[in-house]
Image: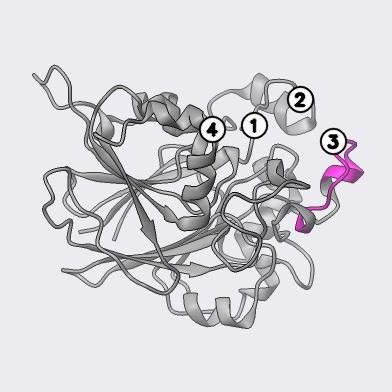
Amino acid sequence: MLRVVVLGAGAGGGVPQWNCGCEGCRAARAIGDELLRTQASVAFSGDGEHWFLINASPDLRQQLNATPQLHPKAGALRHTPVAGVILTNGEVDAVAGLLSMREGSPFTIYAHEKVLAILSANSIFNVLSEKNVRRQPIAIGEPFEPRLPDGARSGIEVLPFAVPGKSAWYLEGKAHPGGETGDGDTLGLKITDKTTGKCFYFIAACAEVTDALKAEIDGAALVFFDGTVWQDDEMIRAGLGYKTGKSMGHVAMSGDDGAIARLADLDIDRKLFLHINNSNPALLPASPERKAAEQAGWQIPADGTEIVL
């Protein structure tokens, strides 16, 4: 049985963002729990005992403490159910939380060589001693089975695949530690329970919905998909930034080329937007944008949402 918990559904900065007074952040401060979102990450497990994280957001410590499934087992002086972390990109949103996992518990980091090169190039990640924290490269199109801390099989297969995107924004104008050519900076993941055959897809960053991507996820039971912005120039219109969603590596929810329209003809049982920016009006329960997304069959999940496949 495959269990998935949404640790965080927000984009960088979460909701509310510490220095933002936009409509979404003001509403979150006023209303509280219903609108609060930490930064995007999910946890999954095949046995309910050992868990793997997809990305380690800057809010990871808060997320672990808020998720009973990830607490140390009763009576243990030091313990964690977290067996590994799978990174889909090298953005701050995806890797900063690793620094909160430096207290000596063993786990494995799984990432493409381009992302591992970013970690290796920044000495701050050396606090994760490789005596306890292995770094295992993963390759596009090559499925792997993440292992438990004792080396036992997890019973879960993970298939990484390339998604249109870009390298981390903090590398713009700088030499990429992993090289400038080839895919690997932005991955999607297909997670399959090898016993039941149940699977889900995780795509938290995607600059374009291609036909190849549509073919990959068609027929899925569950898809987490990039929901950063409602419209491509949203942050510019709101006076919150100068970049479009696409220039940041994120396709909009709306519009003819947006996720809602491009994925409308696919047979997907359950569709959830993830990595939702504080500027996105679909966060607001009473907004016409939320209504439009829900009418199209999409959900805007709260942190802590658990799904069993």
According to the image, label 1 marks what residue? 13
Residue contact at pointers 2 and 4, CB within 8 angstroms: no
The colour scheme used to paint the residues is one colour
**Picture disc at residue 240:** 3
The magenta stretch is 235-246
Q: Distance of mark 1 from mark 2, alpha carbons?
A: 9 Å
Q: Disc 3 to disc 1, how far (Cα)?
A: 13 Å
Identify which residue is drawn at 58% across, 23% down.
32
Contact between labelled residues 2 and 1, with CB atoms less than 8 Å apart:
yes
Tell which residue pokes out farthest to the left in this image. Answer: 75
Mark 3 and mark 1 lie on one chain; the one further toward the N terminus is: 1
Between discs 1 and 4, the one toward the N terminus:
1
The disc, 3 or 4, on the residue closer to the chain's N-terminal end is 4
Q: Are marks 2 and 3 in contact (CB under 8 Å)?
A: yes
Q: Quadrant of the N terminus?
A: bottom left
What's the residue at 55%, 31% (across, down)? 34
**Direction from residue 96 to residue 73 in the image, left or right:** left
What residue sits 49% from the left and 78% below the top? 216
